[in-house]
Amino acid sequence: MNDGEIACRQLVKTYNLGQPNEFIALKGIDLEIKEADLISIIGPSGSGKSTLLNLISCLDTPTKGDVFIEGTAISTLNGFERARLRREKLGFVFQQFNLIRSMTSFENIELPMRFEGISTGERHKRVEELLSLVGLEDKAGNRPTELSGGQQQRVAIARALANNPKIILADEPTGNLDTEAGKKIMDLLIKLNKEEKKTVIVVTHDPRIAKAADKTVKIQDGRII
Ligand SMILES: Nc1ncnc2c1ncn2[C@@H]1O[C@H](COP(=O)(O)OP(=O)(O)O)[C@@H](O)[C@H]1O
Ligand SMILES: [Mg+2]
């Protein structure tokens, strides 16, 4: 029934703004995403892109329909199982970076592995690998305030990769970056897809991503067009 790594079936999301007002943000989304696909999601502001990403991320639950990840219907999971799926299979990159300000790059990247109970030696080896992957070997000891926006986002990407998830979700990851820094982030996401075979789903209008993408999903007014 579900061949892809991720499938959205008849997804509807309604926000209740106090009865009788309600707002239908997604109006029946069907989407199939295969393993190691690079998917770009585009569409005007307010069209439902973040809402869709939040549903695929299991951050939010649909009003109707379901999201399947590797054949598992998210609606059948309890909160604990959902959290585990998020930790093990998904990595998140946000527009605002969301790094912990009191922690160094090294500590931010290491944090998800602490929650998984990975040994100190293994954690440290992995952090070094990830710092090198994102080209920040020399910034291990710096806190977010000591980094540029682009560098912070590279730390955030390394953190998203800490537990080696198969799927990376990024919502306008270059929204707060200048063109040059944004280019580096997009190139890094493309590299993760092409070389590390990650499934990458990114909300962006970046032409480089559009060019490299297996599929571009255009959303308008809560529908795929
Ligand atoms: N928590 C919420 N409560 C009410 N309306 C919301 C909420 N979140 C989003 N919306 C509305 O849903 C629509 C889609 O939002 P969103 O998915 O964030 O759009 P996009 O990411 O494409 O800009 C918008 O009209 C927005 O105002
Ligand atoms: Mg958005």
Image: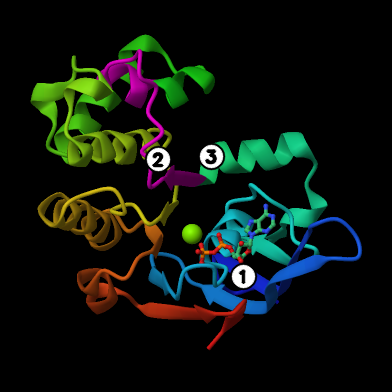
- The magenta region covers 90-110
Residue indicated by mark 3: 88
Give the mark, 2 or 1, whose residue is nearer the N terminus: 1
Q: Position of residue 123 (x, y in %)?
A: 34, 19
Q: Nearer the viewer, residue 73 or 26?
A: 26
* SS label for mark 3: helix
Q: Nearer the viewer, residue 3 or 104?
A: 104
Residue indicated by mark 2: 164
Which amino acid type corresponds to the residue marked 1 in the rendered image? Ala
Say left or right for 104 vs 18. Answer: left
* SS label for mark 1: strand
Q: As displayed, is residue 29 above or below residue 172?
A: below
State the CA–CA distance, disc 2 to disc 1: 21 Å
Q: As displayed, is residue 16 above or below residue 155?
A: below
Q: Position of residue 150 (x, y in %)?
A: 19, 42
Q: Residue at x 21, y 51 (%)?
A: 185
Say left or right for 116 vs 164. Answer: right
Residue indicated by mark 1: 7
Say left or right for 80 vs 211. Answer: right
Q: Residue at x 40, y 70 (%)?
A: 39
* SS label for mark 2: loop
Q: Does the closest atom of ligand 1 sit within 8 Å of the Cβ of label 1?
A: no
Q: Residue at x 18, y 28 (%)?
A: 147
Are there few (<14), some (14-19), or many (20+) residues within 10 Å of tag 1? many
Say left or right for 129 vs 103. Answer: left
Q: Is residue 105 magenta?
A: yes
Report the mark closest to the observer, 2 or 1: 1
Residue 150 visible in the shown view: yes
Rendering quarter of residue 3: bottom right
Q: As displayed, is residue 8 above or below residue 225?
A: above
Q: Does the closest atom of ligand 2 sit within 8 Å of the Cβ of label 2?
A: no
Give the mark, 3 or 1, whose residue is nearer the N terminus: 1
